[in-house]
Structures are given as structure tokens and as C-alpha cells.
Amino acid sequence: MTAAFPAVMPTYARAEIGFERGEGPYLWGTDGRRYLDFTCGIAVTALGHAHPHLIKEVTAQMNKVWHTSNVFPIAQQEKLAERLVAATFADTVFFGNSGAEANECGIKVVRKFHAHHGHPERYRIITFEGAFHGRTLATLAAGGQKKYLEGFGPVVPGFDQVAFGDLKLVEAAIGPETAGILIEPVQGEGGVRVVPNDFLQGLRDLCDQHGLLLFFDEIQTGMGRSGKLFAYEWTGVTPDVMTVAKALGNGFPVGACLATAKAAVGMVAGTHGSTYGGNPLATAAGNAVLDVMLAPDFFDGVEKLASHMKQQLHGLVQRHPDIFEDARGLGLLLGLKCKVPNTDVVKALRKEGLLTVAAGDNVVRVLAPLIAEAKHVSEAIDAIDKGCAALRAELPARKAG
């Protein structure tokens, strides 16, 4: 090992602190401080840290069997798939280990659908500026962001990107090779931009008109983050394919690609696979998450908290017009559009004991766990007020510099 090069490949600009333990909405740092975690591992730990039911269920599975391989039936996987099918539009589910893998499967479902029907030339998928679909070569190409593609050779073909929210451009991009349309109901990484329902309905209509598959990426919006189990439930628009990961395992790596029987018709034995995907531990975690989220009144509480938090964020914008431009989002996927660099805001809030995360369009994502309470929202708002005051004190010096 070269002395100047770290053992962990330096692909992240990491913060100066790590964390030793967590409980509910809090993390305790290596610096000895307690932090309110409104990053949630970037919308992953939706049920907070050390949730007792999740610990119980995953520990019980650990004491039985960790892994067997998908060449054998896995009871926990079948149970989780049946529950996801029962709760959604889907008829079938494939399990992987991450959001990127789920999206890779979704891309393959879309392409295979047309090949199965005798049109292998239909493989291109329309995507949108500002999107983020993962870090594999194909999902990077789907996202189309130059900063992530640079240096990795030729871009994987098969994706046609159009401007966000322009239905006429989408229609113009449809050609004889078009297979489907891929979109996030809310662009998380892209700046917490909510896609209007009428635009999603327009995409559904175009897909129906041209024989395309509509593919929703709900990696970040799914599993309760929107205030319902999945964000598409707010829209009145049903996709043919949908991906989910992040909060599905509350931090245990698991992703899933859901599809209708019609869309998945070509996905037969041998067409796709995963060594670890849907193993007993991962699907035990997923089932434990659903136990909590599908309990009566759970989402009523999430919606109530989300409404309260969004109102409080709009109040912050009014109190700090020199720092913030707008509050936006859906459910507890919320963001503050900044007038100063969002990374400066994230650092200022961390100094006040609040963890948030930057997004595109100079937005700070504020991602409360779904189990948070009004008192935690008040704690977060107080920290943001204090962080803004500290930033404001620095502004004259920065301008002078």
C-alpha cells in the first residue's frame, strides 16, 4: 500500500466525525456529542436507529440462517414479495442489494419486454435532466450527469435525456427504438423537485399511446418517505415498473424491482440473478420494516408530522430570506433552497447538532425519520435558526474576502 494513499478508496469527501451508536432519531458521534439525525443515511433509516422490532426480527434470523442462495426457495423473500405485491400495483418482485441494482433490473425488464414481443430494437429509455438513478455504468448513463460520468469511458448507450417537466420534449424524443420512460416522482439528489401529477399523467398517456413501459424510480421516495408507502399513490398514476431500496431494509442492504405481470413477461429463469439479493437476513429486515409501516395509523402520523415540518420550514424561509429562497418537497422528503452555498449550510447545522445533507440545485435536504415527533422538529428548527445566525455573522467577512 502506498503510504500517501488511504486504505479506504477516497471516493467520498467525508465529514470530520463518525458515529458510535444511535437510538431513535439520534446519533452519538466520535466527538462525544449527540446529533439529531435528519439525514437518515440519505433517506435510509426511516425508522430511526436501533429500532427494537427490527433488532428482534433480524437477530432472530441471524440465529437461524444467513444465506442459502437463490437456487433454493427463501421463505422470508417470498413473504416480503407477497406483501409488496399486496400493497402495490405490482404482480412480481426481484430482490437485489441496492437501488442501483434495482434500477439495473428495471432497465432489463423494460428492454426484455419489447424483445419478448419481437422488437429487440426497442431498447432506449427516456430520462430527465437532474435525475439520479445510481452509480453503475448503465444507471449513470440514465442519470446523465456529467460530473458522475467523466473519466469512465464511453457512456452506455440507450438513454435519451430531456428537460424536466416538458411533455412536448418527451413526445418529440419518442422514436421507433424507444422502450420506456424512467422518472423519479420526486428528484431527491436533483434538488427535492416534485414532479407535477399532470406531467406524470401525461407520461402515462404517452406510454399507453406508444406501447411503452412507465418506470418509476422510488428508491428515495418509497417506503413511507412521501407520507404514503409509495409516492405514486399520491399521483393517481400507476407505473408498469417501480424500484425501491434505501428504507426497505432501514439500513440493511436490500433493493427491489416491482413490476406487473405484463411488463415482466420476459423475465424467466436465467434472464437475471443476484448472489446475495433477497437473502434471509435482508428480507427479514424488509419484513420487519413493513411490520412497522403497515401498522394501523402509522402513515397518518407521518402525514401529520410532514405537514407540521413543512410549515416550520416555510417559516424559516421567511425569517432568514438572506439564507433561504424556498422550502419544497413531499411528505418528509423536504428541502431548503439556499442563497448561500448549501455545503456551508450543512456544516453550520452540523455545528448546531443537526445532520442534514446537500442535494442538487443548491438545496439542503432535511430528512427526518418517520418515527420523529413534534419535539424533534422543534429541536431541528431551533438548530437551523442558530445555524443561520452563525452564517449571517460570517457573511460580511466572506463578501469582504
Image (spheres, rainbow, N blue to C red):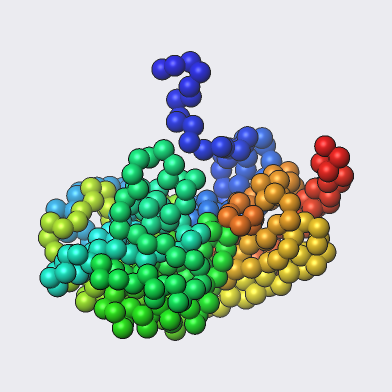
What residue appears at the point 43 percent right and 82 percent down from the top-left corner? Answer: 201
- The x and y percentages for residue 396 are 87, 44
Please indicate whether residue 196 sits to the left or right of residue 160 in the image: right
- The x and y percentages for residue 34 are 67, 45
- The x and y percentages for residue 24 are 58, 55
What residue appears at the point 61 percent right and 57 percent down from the top-left corner? Answer: 361
Q: Residue 232: which quarter of the image?
A: bottom left
What residue appears at the point 37 percent right and 62 percent down from the top-left corner? Answer: 160
- The x and y percentages for residue 375 are 71, 64
Vertical side of 318 occupied by 48: above or below: above
The quarter in which the C terminus is drawn is top right
What residue appears at the point 52 percent right and 51 percent down from the top-left corner? Answer: 41
Please indicate whether residue 180 sits to the left or right of residue 196 in the image: left
Viewer-side residue, 331 vs 353? 331
Residue 44 at least partly seen? yes
Q: Residue 229: which quarter of the image?
A: bottom left
Viewer-side residue, 59 vs 233? 233
Residue 57 at least partly seen? no
